[in-house]
Image: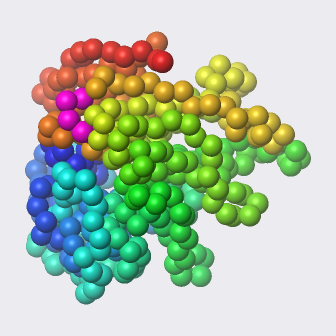
Amino acid sequence: MTSKHTSRLIHAHNVQKPKTSDRTIKIYDIHNNTYTPTATLTGHTGPIYQLSWSHPKYGTILASASFDGSVLLHRETGGGTSSNTSSGRKASAGGARGSGRGGGHSAGSASGANAANTGGNNNWTTIKAFINLHESSVNSVQFAPHEYGLVCCAASSDGRVSVMTHGEDGEWTVEYLADCKLGVNAVSWAPYSVKASGSSGDGGPVPMPPRIVTGGCDNGIRIWVRNPTTSVWEQEEFEGGHKDWVRDVAWAPVIIPGVSVIASCSEDRTVIIWKKGEEDEGNGDGDFGSDRVDANDEGEESKKKWSSTVLPTFEDPVWRLSWSVTGNILAVSSGDSNVTLWKEELDGSWSRVTHVEDVGESGGAGKEDGSVGQQ
């Protein structure tokens, strides 16, 4: 994964955008390091900027975001791959954001979406085409944690974030969030988590409301939370940002209960790790730690500030971020076409992994070089 636009560590799904603009998506099966092309997906009328896999409980569904202002949902209806560790699936998008300053305007709407088989027995169909979803380029797309249902959000240069929800009646609804007037470059969902019910009486855990983080062309970062009472998306207080456009944001998987971690990267050549929550608030029962927050404490919980750790400045603008499934390793893709890996040490510092050897060949974990402490 050496593209300057994308780096992804998503289970067996490695998503990469090459430097082409043929407006197609290539599907590959991976077995013992052998890549076999199985399908070519079409339908977009502009370059494709980002892809996102749904959770397997909903089948094999792939969302694609494009310069044409649309989001398409593609589903595999036959074939498939085995789920063992030596096999996987890769999607490669035929479109890459230019190295210049902008997402641009819509190049038209998607129509005639289809999939052409190029081998194997894999069949793909477009189950939903959100044509003209936005008035300008759709720069980012991501499925929500499966616990929230089949939900997908997208960020656009028109300044809005769209939230697409598949209802129990089989219909899709779309909500729009007015985020950044200058344009939104990236969006990421918070991982699913729970808290104690507090005054509800039964004492059982209840889910935290859905949250998303966005990065915009105003150099800012915004956090949105869906009010569990009104179901309205509300903006949460967040202080801090970058000195230039925010190119990507990534909410990390939960490592310590009650602690939220977000990574952001920017044209200003920096990566910032944002952290919120008390690591020593655990109740000692090993269940939920500091996620066991009484309902009466929610006001105090919301007042906690986000702390920041800035990684050493990169030589080029930083384009893409991706967390490992364990949440302790961050992949950073920058404008020099390099992908570097960073991991958090026990003391809270961040070390760069400068060389990663193939586990199958050496079994090694790589070399480390440099560290940065908590600010």
Left or right: where 136 falls relative to 355: right
Residue 223 x/y as whole percent: 55, 48
Find residue 138 and report its image quarter.
bottom left
Name the residue at 38% across, 37% down. 243
**Residue 173 magenta-highlighted:** no
Left or right: where 9 falls relative to 301: left
Find residue 360 and report its image quarter.
top left
Indicate whether 224 appears above or below 339: below
Indicate whether 18 appears above or below 160: above
- How many marks the image carries: the answer is 0
Name the residue at 24% across, 65% down. 48
Residue 191 x/y as whole percent: 52, 46
Query: Which of the pair 352/241 is nearer the observer?
Result: 241
- The answer to whether residue 214 is visible is yes
Prevailing secondary structure class for the magenta stretch in the rendered image: loop
Find residue 110 and report its image quarter.
bottom left
**Residue 317 magenta-highlighted:** yes
Q: Residue furthest bottom?
A: 112
Name the residue at 51% across, 35% down. 240
Query: Which of the pair 243/10 is nearer the observer?
Result: 243
Residue 79 x/y as whole percent: 25, 70
Indicate whether 344 appears above or below 331: above
Left or right: where 126 falls relative to 54: left
The boundaries of the magenta stretch are 314-318
Left or right: where 27 falls relative to 147: left
Name the residue at 13% across, 45% down. 33
- The answer to whether residue 77 is visible is no
Residue 369 x/y as whole percent: 24, 15
Where the N terminus falls, by quadrant?
Answer: top left
Coloring scheme of the render?
Answer: rainbow
